[in-house]
């Protein structure tokens, strides 16, 4: 399973929220570690906000089913954004079989963008385990090793073309 999410936000919206509401605004949307790493930079916080929205889209629920701080974006020692899911976001990702996430964020002077790509194995219905399926075919009864070659005309599309130009009408 593969899913994506993308979001674009005006940095000014985050700047106004920080100016008007201060810590109350920051604490609603960002973890303590995110706030410390961004050091009040509106552009950096806006990028994380956009990633959080993008994660909600990739989960197929939007932010309504997860809390803002259930999605955490922190940079590693090289500055690469790393995603950590907590609580409801982590449960939803697990239910949907999404285990591997890639994150990218960027900003200009006026806008920030967040992009996520998630992949994993699709969830299996109860009682259907991995590796179950039809038994392997005995040698000579399939297309695998030990099978005889197929006669011409019994393969994928072979023999379906006209044998010469006389069979083709314009």
Image: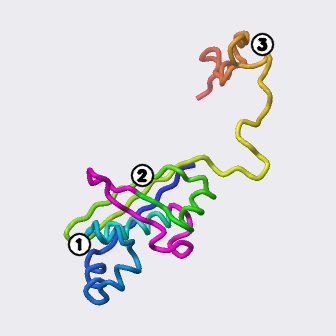
Q: Residue at point 71% right, 36% down?
A: 131
- Disc with the residue nearer the chain's start (1 vs 3): 1
Q: Residue at point 35% right, 67% down?
A: 33
Say whether residue 128 is left or right of residue 5.
Answer: right
Alpha carbon separation for disc pair 3 and 2: 44 Å
Residue 137's tag is: none
For label 1, the crowd category at 10 Å Cα-Cα, with few meaning under 14, some 14 to 19 and many 20 or more, is some
Mark 3 or 2: in front is 2
Residue 69 lies within the magenta run: yes
Which of these two is toward me, 3 or 90?
A: 90
Marks 2 & 1, CB-CB < 8 Å contact: no
Residue 94 position in % (x across, y down): 60, 57
Alpha carbon separation for disc pair 2 and 1: 23 Å
- Disc with the residue nearer the chain's start (3 vs 2): 2
Residue 41's tag is: 1
Q: Pointer 3: what residue?
A: 140
Q: Residue furthest left?
A: 109
Mark 2 or 1: in front is 1
Which of these two is toward me, 98 or 143?
A: 98
Residue span colored magenta: 58-82
Q: Pointer 2: what residue?
A: 102
- Disc with the residue nearer the chain's start (2 vs 1): 1
Say whether residue 43 is left or right of residue 7.
Answer: left
Say whether residue 64 is left or right of residue 139.
Answer: left
């Amino acid at each position: 399973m593969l899913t994506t999410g993308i979001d674009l936000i005006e940095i000014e919206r985050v700047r106004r929220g920080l100016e008007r509401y201060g810590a109350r605004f920051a604490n609603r949307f960002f973890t303590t570690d995110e706030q410390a790493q961004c050091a009040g930079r509106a552009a950096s916080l806006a990028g994380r906000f956009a990633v959080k929205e993008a994660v909600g889209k990739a989960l197929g629920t939007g932010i309504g089913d997860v809390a803002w701080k259930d999605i955490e974006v922190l940079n590693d020692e090289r500055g690469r954004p790393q995603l950590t899911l907590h609580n409801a976001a982590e449960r939803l990702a697990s239910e949907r079989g999404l285990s591997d996430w890639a994150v990218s964020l960027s900003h200009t002077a006026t806008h920030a963008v967040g992009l996520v790509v998630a992949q994993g194995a699709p969830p299996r219905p109860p009682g259907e385990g991995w590796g179950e399926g039809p038994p392997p075919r005995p040698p000579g009864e399939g297309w695998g090793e030990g099978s005889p070659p197929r006669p011409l005309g019994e393969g994928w599309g072979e023999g379906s073309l006209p044998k010469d130009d006389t069979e083709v009408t314009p």
